Image (cartoon, coloured by chain):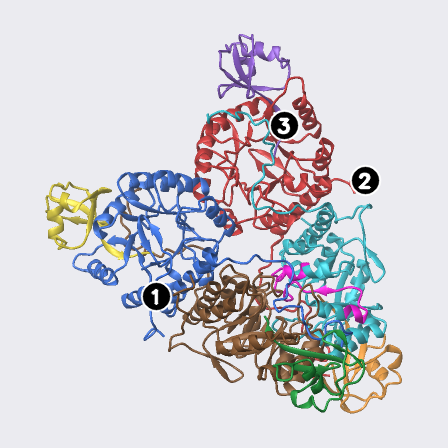
Chain colours: A blue, B brown, C cyan, D red, E green, F orange, G purple, H yellow
Amino acid sequence: MNDGSPPLTHDAAQETFALYGQAFSSRLLLGTARYPSPAKLADSVRRSGCEIVTVSLRRETAHAGEGQRFWELLRDLGVAVLPNTAGCRTVREAVTTAQMARELFDTSWIKLEVIANDDTLQPDVFQLVEAANQLVDEGFDVFPYTTDDLSVAERLLEAGCQVLMPWGAPIGSGRGLANPYALRTMRYYFPDVPLIVDAGIGRPSHALAAMELGYDAIMLNTAVALADDPAEMAHAFAATIDAGRRAWRAGLMEERDMAVPSTPVAGTPFFGFPET
Amino acid sequence: MNDGSPPLTHDAAQETFALYGQAFSSRLLLGTARYPSPAKLADSVRRSGCEIVTVSLRRETAHAGEGQRFWELLRDLGVAVLPNTAGCRTVREAVTTAQMARELFDTSWIKLEVIANDDTLQPDVFQLVEAANQLVDEGFDVFPYTTDDLSVAERLLEAGCQVLMPWGAPIGSGRGLANPYALRTMRYYFPDVPLIVDAGIGRPSHALAAMELGYDAIMLNTAVALADDPAEMAHAFAATIDAGRRAWRAGLMEERDMAVPSTPVAGTPFFGFPET
Amino acid sequence: MNDGSPPLTHDAAQETFALYGQAFSSRLLLGTARYPSPAKLADSVRRSGCEIVTVSLRRETAHAGEGQRFWELLRDLGVAVLPNTAGCRTVREAVTTAQMARELFDTSWIKLEVIANDDTLQPDVFQLVEAANQLVDEGFDVFPYTTDDLSVAERLLEAGCQVLMPWGAPIGSGRGLANPYALRTMRYYFPDVPLIVDAGIGRPSHALAAMELGYDAIMLNTAVALADDPAEMAHAFAATIDAGRRAWRAGLMEERDMAVPSTPVAGTPFFGFPET
Amino acid sequence: MNDGSPPLTHDAAQETFALYGQAFSSRLLLGTARYPSPAKLADSVRRSGCEIVTVSLRRETAHAGEGQRFWELLRDLGVAVLPNTAGCRTVREAVTTAQMARELFDTSWIKLEVIANDDTLQPDVFQLVEAANQLVDEGFDVFPYTTDDLSVAERLLEAGCQVLMPWGAPIGSGRGLANPYALRTMRYYFPDVPLIVDAGIGRPSHALAAMELGYDAIMLNTAVALADDPAEMAHAFAATIDAGRRAWRAGLMEERDMAVPSTPVAGTPFFGFPET
Amino acid sequence: MQVTINGEARDVDAATLAELCDALGFGDARVATAVNGDFVSRTQRAERQLQADDRIEIVAPRQGG
Amino acid sequence: MQVTINGEARDVDAATLAELCDALGFGDARVATAVNGDFVSRTQRAERQLQADDRIEIVAPRQGG
Amino acid sequence: MQVTINGEARDVDAATLAELCDALGFGDARVATAVNGDFVSRTQRAERQLQADDRIEIVAPRQGG
Amino acid sequence: MQVTINGEARDVDAATLAELCDALGFGDARVATAVNGDFVSRTQRAERQLQADDRIEIVAPRQGG
């Protein structure tokens, strides 16, 4: 399927959305981990038209050069790079990791994760807010991985975050939106803040449900990386997310309890006669 | 949004699916009723790349010429036409309506609806099967609007139907898949029969949920026709349905109860030290 | 837990409901199969206050006397007996089984099951209606195991059935109400027909969901029989079902999108001061 | 219905559960607000067998004596009293309110609410933890109204709370469990901490869903107070919650994808013959 | 002779369905017809004699879902 | 004479269903019977002649759901 | 001297919180008190001097959820 | 002098972090560094003296989600 299949393109008339002053057309943020090969990763990024990828930093073995090769792959892809602090458990670990990432990837962007426990990988919301405050003070553009808690969200915005990344469900669980009601409330509560659902997206319908709630973008990784055909799945997600944005703007219908004929009733043949 | 925005195209490598021996690339079947204007309808068909539309027949007022104008619109769109028997309540009404439709639209295709009641517009499954038997005998290619009931489905197939159109939810309700479990069972039970979800689709995520179950195509009308921007919504549905097919083929991940890190744990900085 | 724990009783003021002219207080119908022992079955019936049990008939081995012993157990329990036609696949099998059951159990009641396939054990709705017609003509009081299909339900009522037993989900699946929307519609559509959810109930909350929809009673078996402590589970189901009826009559609140304080706002201390 | 209908009793063999060293049989905590009359409130408490009620304190008008009369009602009911800090928005308001409540109600128990906003009435988790720390230090037995966030829960336990009261959904919304997955995770994560779902319960099936997850108790108010017949609804909730506990202990079955006959297949009449 | 056309009572002179269609201006129009619940094809219209109280349906293509 | 009883081939001497039931020890037992798919009531058993290849069902009360 | 009692501005003569409670008829009532956001227990009321602009809360038991 | 590099105990001769990076072959590599939990930027490495028991992190770009 991949060969010859064109990448998803974004037509000229399409709206863009802004993250820390940069405009993007694609509303898919793609993780770069767990792909079968670097080639499959590159293919997935290209096929999806994705403009932002997340990356991490890990301990380097001397001479291995793995970091350098990955860096060159990123450069060739020509996408914006969003480093994360995955695996950090304390404010200090997260802040130091962010500082190292800024130097390594030459970007002030940081996807801030401070993890509370291994079972859910949920954010420790207290340390998250504290780390966000420190990093904003140091000039970072913080993308906080958070929950759907409004009291946490408000403190992150007060800290200076200009985007929020609430989780859909635990990272890698593929369960979709565990609490669509809370995510809907969050959208209403912060109508002007870019909101990106991060984590828990297992299939395109999960991403679409968030877009239909008016979310601005979707961050995912595992569902693409572990698909039998990652590039095809990346394309499917990207197309779905784009369609979700269009649908949201085009005006979704309300659901109804009773049926309503789509074909007009007026002029129905045989109407008015005893059953024939 | 409509102007300048290109129609959804289907790349060459894409699979097709067959209905009564005809191959189609688009998996969206679009109803033609309830649009703000014929121009919006035409725009929606074009923007979506839809290849099959449903139509009806209604009593004609002398000299009005409405039927002729609609016929010309259909001819210009160049799509396959699937007439329905909407509003019929008896076998005889449905059969006669099908016969009139065959002459009017010059097609042996018929979307067979025999309605049980006004509240749900659900099929009367007994009359549906009887009408299907008669129509197949008369050479029709029957597309039965049915439920997710397997014992009904088996009789429709025995009658000679080569496609099934189970409902998602009552027509025009926009509720999505009322019983995804039953639809999933139906897919497993009839792996080789073209299955099209018909009715009840209110938003792209509803259509996508059916495609992720492995359904072959989606029939809808109201959700597009009543959108603020029908053509944009038609495009959104078509793109979603296409993406759903791709995702299904690309291998959807299983959901899990617990979190799994996407970023690798190995090599995490600070690992092994007391919390810093 | 069983010892000393009193059976669920029904207070005098409580309403009853009627099935074929007989009034009952308990709205739990309990199956008798799959219990660890006859004693556990008897204990479950007693602890639950259940007044109707379902039974079957099976081929008898000479001299075994198993049927006689089961008959005596039923007699000792003093409950109404509802024989089923479980496993029947044709009208003729079901009718003959019903005739044998009438003689064996000395009752005109019959729980009519005509199964369409082994995967779902769903009713074959065509044969179900035909068998119901024959059995009503022969004087049976038919309890049809059916689906939530209104066109089938109408034919069963036309045949003379005075109660309907729609499935919640496949027998033994324990999935609860697969299509609560359809069951709700069915309740509205037939406000005066006794409706009993039969099959698919796995936990008390499933039974309760049906009672909150206004269903008259619940039929279940596996969830009790396979519990670690069947009698305790039978008690739990019976209490829940009784409570569900009370709640339905006491007036369930509507759900709301936004929060509403339960504690009054008026008179809140510190109100009107700057945040202290 | 109320007259003559006996209160729900708890049989001798039933387990109890402990809150700050006190043992209780009833697992329903009932709010006292929004009832049509004090008599209806008293009736609801008595009919439900409830052993703990929540109360508040509000500004007193001189000579009105409303507080004194309510106090006497509570004394007559003979139940444990759990004062709340409803409406408080800051740590200081909550702490002072708790101190006033301790003197007024002569109890060290306090249901700690620090509200983040009026739309959701969700806890402000940062101030909640800080207030919990202060109140535990002052010798209070704190019942924190919190979310399903594990990182918040851990800090509340570290502060010295011996019970957690996560919300089901916004107060007064009656939506049930907005995130059953998170509540289930919380139960697994804290197997030995008394967990009480507080807020959002609209119907008995909502309470039951929480009990089936293994929650220890349910706190609710509006669903009973605003029922057409509050005492009957209180009884229904109490019976359901009790049944939920029994069911959880008796061993809930797992749900399955496919059907499994409850009536044994072996010995089915007509088996092995061509369809008759 | 009185017949019912598309649900409305009408006095007509036509002896056949074809004549009726002509008289109503549907001669060449894209319409299909039924009489008393039975389909009458375009080619059969000339042979189809009308009788008093016949119920005639004349339908044309229309939007549908 | 060979018949099938509850799905198993058996050689029997009984001329009637009643005799067969007696021979099998079901004389007074709480059982119901069918032959070749048709119900045979307790009172009809004595009149019901058996033929070779008859398919006989003899059933008793059992647990059911 | 003007103070605020339960959100309303009032002129009062009382020198202490205890005197104020007596004057308002709350002498023996089941009420609790706070001044300027701080709890003042029943036993402290007599010692608690009031000042102009003090914000005083006097609360009693009430229904709650 | 013994230090911990990326979680492993190592004997090293380097006096500064820059020397250590050179010795390990990371001189020009795309790596970032921290000592005892604090970030040390590329330009600071030459000034950063090492001490026994220092915990040193040397990290590089990697895939992440």
Looking at the image, residue E37 sits to the left or right of residue C172; the answer is: right
What residue does disc 2 label?
D4
Q: CA distance from mark 1 to mark 3?
A: 63 Å
Look at discs 2 and 3 and give the one toward the viewer.
3
Q: Which mark is residue B260?
A: none
Q: Nearer the viewer, residue B36 or C210?
A: B36
Q: Tell me where residue H12 appears, x and y as whole percent.
A: 13, 48
Kind of residue sitting beneath label 3: Arg
Q: Chain of mark 2?
A: D
**Residue type for callout 2:** Gly
Mark 3 residue element: strand
Horizontal and vertical percent position of residue C238: 71, 53
2 and 3 marks on the same chain: no
In the rendered image, residue B237, in percent from the top left (x then y), is placed at 48, 66
Q: CA distance from mark 1 to mark 2?
A: 73 Å
Disc 2, SS: loop
In the rendered image, which residue does mark 1 sit on? A9
| Mark 3 lies on residue | G62
Residue D81 horizontal side relative to residue A30, left or right: right
User: Whole-percent x and y of residue C122?
Assistant: 66, 71
Of H32 and B258, which appears nearest the observer? H32
Which span is picked out in magenta?
Answer: C156-184
Q: Is residue C130 visible?
A: yes
